Amino acid sequence: RVYYRKTLRVQPQSAAAYAYSGEIFLRQRRAFDALLAYERVKRLDPNWPGLALALAKSYEQTGRTSEAAEAYAQAVAADSSDWQARAG
């Protein structure tokens, strides 16, 4: 986590650093922070691999169910073989 914070200070436009920070936040059950990180990734690189699924999980954990359902649908559309997206 510290590494990504340092990276963001040096490279504030790094979609990768925000994506990995979001992943860490989700693992720590800090869904709101994860959502903020993933929304930043969406602005920086809307085609980031796995972004729709990551957003879906974040929306779901913050109680934003309609947005979660839409993001899960986008994740399935992007990769119909992704079992996590289909299970969402």
Image: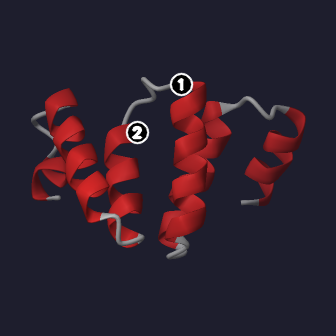
Q: Tell me the colour scheme of the image.
A: secondary structure
Precedes in sequence: disc 2 or disc 1? 1
Q: Secondary structure at mark 2?
A: helix
Q: In the image, is 14 to the left or to the right of 79?
A: right
Identify the residue at horizontal 56%, vertical 36% (top origin). 41
User: Residue 66 location in percent, x, y?
Assistant: 24, 57
Identify the residue at horizontal 62%, vertical 53% (top origin). 21
Q: In the image, is 7 to the left or to the right of 72?
A: right
Above/below status of 67 relative to 62: above
- Checking the image for residue 51, the label placed there is 2
Q: Determine which quarter of the picture holds residue 10.
A: top right
The Cα atoms of the two marked residues, 2 and 1, are separated by 9 Å
Identify the residue at horizontal 41%, vertical 60% (top origin). 58
Above/below status of 20 relative to 75: below
Identify the residue at horizontal 81%, vertical 41% (top origin). 7
Amino acid type for the residue under numbered disc 1: Asp
Are the residues flagged by discs 2 and 1 in contact, CB closer than 8 Å?
yes
Above/below status of 72 relative to 30: above
User: Residue 20 location in percent, x, y?
Assistant: 58, 48
Q: Which residue is mark 1?
A: 45
Above/below status of 55 relative to 14: below
Q: Quadrant of the C terminus?
A: bottom left
Q: In the image, is 60 to the left or to the right of 48?
A: left
Amino acid type for the residue under numbered disc 2: Leu
